Amino acid sequence: MKKIFLSLCLLGVISNVSSQEFANAPKPFGPLPTQKQIDWQEMEFYAFVHFSLNTFTNKEWGYGDESPELFNPSQLDVRQWARVVKEAGMKGIILVAKHHDGFCLWPSAYTERSVKNSPWENGKGDLVKELAEACKEYDLKLGLYLSPWDRNHPQYGKPEYITYFRNQLKELLTNYGDVFEMWFDGANGGDGYYGGANETRKINSLTYYNWDETYKMIYDIAPKTLVWGVGPSEARWIGNEEGRAGKTNWSLLRQKDELAGKVHYSEFMSGHEDGEKWVPGEADVSIRPGWFYHAVEDDKVRSLDEMVDIYYESIGRNATLLLNLPVDRRGLVHENDEARLKELVATIKADFKTELLAGAKVQASNTRAVDSNFGPQNVVDGNKNTYWATDDKVKQAAIEFTFKKPTAINRILLQEYIKLGQRVKAFSVEANVNGQWKTIANETTIGYKRILRLDRVTASAIRVNILDAKAGFVISTIQAYNAPTFVKEPQILRDKNGLVTIKSEDGNAVYYTLDGKNPSEKSILYKTPFTYNKAVTIKAISRNTKEKINSAVKMAKYGVSKEKWKVISVSSGDTKTVEKIIDGDASTDWGFGNDENKLPQSVIIDMGELMEIKGFTYIPQQVGNNLNLISNYEFYTSEDNITWTKQSEGEFSNIKHNPIEQFKSFAAVKARFLRFVATAGIGKGQSVSIAEISIIE
Ligand code: FUL
């Protein structure tokens, strides 16, 4: 019987047989994923929704004292979210059920700080329930975020709060059906309302939450739930909020070290080759600069270029992609975000339209000797459970695909059969072009999925060389595609004096408009930098004239240029280079004094004339590692540099992990002089810097 079954498999009659079912299959190697982790990894792409009081207060982090009455969406429609997510091919939604300010989107029995005290649905609403139902209807999985840090709770920092936190977890994991992922954020910022105490509470994040107990409870009541983030988690943060994994990305982590506080989060991008546990990376990013909705970001939705890069640098680098859609005050995913998502999905679909290796002749330099069930043809059979395997000790081998005729390709997709562990340490790709082999990629890990974006080559054959592995390797998929040429948007820069420079990649032509209309190849052709110092919206495209393909439209909005601006006083630091903070270039920055200088530190700017202003923006340092960031500020204005009025003070929430431009608005005021004071910084160094200060007109 077994024999007949085997020969049927070999003939391809029964195709859904896993290679692992054969007696001589390779043994697992190193830490392995659980089935739960494999199912999760195969979801690949799912959505995040940040929607809470912050949406109505225009904040990224609430302090904890905001009234639940502010939560009042006018047209809340969770089915619209589910539709948008489903249409984008995403597999689930993780809802922020409670953010750092402690407001609950479900009527928790343990607090009054929830939707039951909001005007929305007359206090009878339950957003978690509504979303759970919409997810069911659209065949999406539901995940939940419950912030461990609670800036509202009076007992935060004491053992009583842990009981409260676990009670809420229990509610979320028992009342709403299956939860595919539970998300525990690591932020513990310190200060908060805390029931009116208005103080800073420091906790030891390694011990305070007693995660071991909490995890036991979760697995007891919700064994299907994958737990993310802090504690002995089953998936890890990728180490940045930009949605980018390392090119080298191990799904392994030295979690024991991590739990002992010995791992810096920057190591999460690549994981640990010698990690003792399978803890794969999840890349999280918002489709806009912030996690919560801010009207000021309606025209700052990440560009298509950026979104495409994010896709390839997350899913294409062995991570899952958790993409945030900040639901707006109406309670809807904003039109601009939906449109961008559609463009992303269309681009990715086009990139992977036609697989090109399936019809090629396949051969390998080594195949597991025992029988032919592990042959190289398994990588192109479309079955994720069959694989090409080498002999146990063979850590180097090549697999070659010969096309029927020279074929253009620019994408290679590879997958290891991760059920048996992650093994490949290094590989290269060669293409045979006009009879000559040339190396077109030199890479490291593969993991669950690795996608390479390459320059287009027309090859008669392709060869993948596995150059080093932890053990004989198991490759389930290798594919090649010829994605349409993608023309990158141009970069627009305007300096202090209003000089506009527009740059394109690869010598592509640039066309632009200054009247707000979308440019085409009939618009003004950019030749050299030009001066435009008035308020303006510049829109530009790059055009690959050879292939007649345009990029997406790049837009840059400017107020009056900073021609007359001068920095007239700084509390410390180099006065010769301080103009970098008003040069219109976010990639250049300037720092106050050195580490010995204590905060506060301040800078005074003279705008050269009286203007009406409605706020200011601060762009923190953008370039480098361990950025010097300002976390708390005061902002003053003056008409005469003598009498000053404080217009705003507060925190730049979440700036450490998401160092984006910070917008602070206030009631319109006439001013000529601006004083920006840094009152606290990130880290102990206390040396902080500024990339750019601007005004909101
Ligand atoms: C961060 C939080 O502090 C942000 O507000 C946001 O929720 C993000 C996803 O995680 O660490």
Image (tube, rainbow, N blue to C red):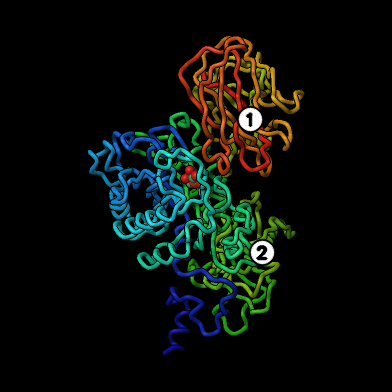
Labels 2, 1: front one: 1
Neighbours of disc 1 within 10 Å: few (<14), some (14-19), many (20+): some
**302 to the left or right of 405:** left
Q: Quadrant of the N terminus?
A: bottom left
Q: Where does label 2 land, which residue?
A: 463
Where disc 2 sits, the SS reads: strand
Q: Could you tell me how far apart the alpha carbons at marks 2 and 1 are, in whole angstroms? A: 59 Å
Percent position of residue 114, x then y: 32, 44
**221 to the left or right of 430:** left
Neighbours of disc 2 within 10 Å: few (<14), some (14-19), many (20+): many
Vertical placement of 592 versus 638: above or below?
below
Which comes before the other along the chain, label 2 or label 1? 2
**158 to the left or right of 655:** left
Identify which amino acid the numbered label 2 is placed on.
Answer: Arg
Q: Quadrant of residue 590?
A: top right
Percent position of residue 492, x then y: 62, 28
| Front residue of 505 and 282 | 282
| Residue drawn at 49 percent across, 63 percent down | 234
Identify which amino acid the numbered label 1 is placed on.
Answer: Pro
**65 to the left or right of 320:** left
